[in-house]
Amino acid sequence: MSGHSKWSTIKHKKGKADTQRGKMFTKLARYITVAAREGGPDPEYNTNLKTAIEKAKAENMPNDNIERAIKKGSGDLDGANFEEIIYEGYGPAGVAVFVECLSDNRNRTASDVRHAFDKYGGNLGSTGCVSWMFERKGLLIIDKTEEIDEEELMLQAIEAGAEDFSGEDEYFEIITSPESFVQVKDTLREAGYSFSTSDITFIPQNETKLEEEKDKNNMIKLIDALEDNDDVQEVYHNWELPEDLDI
């Protein structure tokens, strides 16, 4: 089976652009708060909240912070009212960029996002201009170890409902539909596997190469500028990252 290895390599190598733990915790707390507000405070009955909590714990976010974020979402504590906002546009040389935000100030977020696009050779587009280029999928990354048998893992993943499986140099990538994500994840976890990445995300259907060094540098700066913004949760793009470029 062939996976979206180029795309997942970008995400796997880079992860969050944030280097400050506090900034990462701020984003995770917003994610948890919104998930609790929209689906209730019990992760057993709220898949999005369960996923948000797992992501927070994977980043060693303190339990007190997690509980406080849940209480803000359920109304037990006062907190800002965050809304989900999507921005779409083009980076240097027409690279598609899809930005997910959680913001309590739409005007501030729009201004900051537009500034980043303008500064680094891109332009903010209208709703729907690039979203059609991405597919919503579940993504599971398992780091390779000597104990893991690739064929056995692939068969277990497929039997659990995975759509796609690929083995890369340092990790295994499993793609699922959004609907089967939890089932595949829970099945593999019960089988003893652990994940370095587990999320429902957006995968580009095609990729764009950048030939000019200036465009490559500007694309890196655009991604970093967006991900450094507290209001920005995720940045997706269809840039085909060169193998020798580690960002």
Image (cartoon, rainbow, N blue to C red):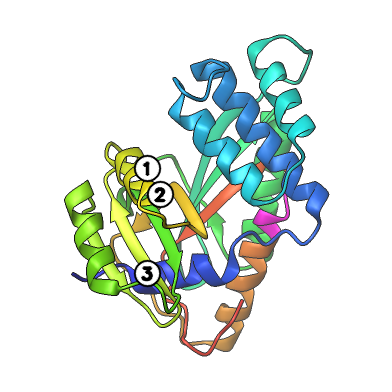
Which residue sits at x=28%, y=64%? 153
- The residue that label 1 is drawn on is 186
Disc assigned to residue 129: none
Residue 49's place in the image compared with 189, above or below, is above
Q: Is residue 121 left or right of residue 153?
A: right
Cα–Cα gap, marks 2 and 3: 14 Å
Image position, residue 104 (x, y; %): 71, 27
Element marked by disc 1: helix
- Mark 3, other Cα within 10 Å: few <14 / some 14–19 / many ≥20: many
Residues tagged 1 and 3 counted as in contact (Cβ below 8 A): no
Which residue sits at x=74%, y=34%? 63
Q: Which of the 4 image quadrants contains residue 110?
A: top right
Q: Nearer the viewer, residue 154 or 41?
A: 154
**Which quadrant is home to the C terminus?**
bottom right
Mark sitting earlier along the chain (1/3): 3
> Does the segment drawn in magenta span residue 226?
yes
Mark sitting earlier along the chain (2/3): 3
Image position, residue 232 (x, y; %): 64, 45
Q: Is residue 48 visible?
A: yes
- Mark 1, other Cα within 10 Å: few <14 / some 14–19 / many ≥20: few
Which residue sits at x=40%, y=56%? 140
* Most frequent secondary structure within the magenta stretch: helix
Residues tagged 1 and 2 counted as in contact (Cβ below 8 A): yes
Residues tagged 2 and 3 counted as in contact (Cβ below 8 A): no
**Which quadrant is home to the N terminus?**
bottom left
- The residue that label 2 is drawn on is 189
Element marked by disc 2: helix
Q: Amino acid at mark 2?
A: Arg
Read off the magenta span.
Answer: 225-229
Residue 157's place in the image compared with 63, above or below, is below
Q: Amino acid at mark 3?
A: Phe
Image position, residue 6 (x, y; %): 38, 74
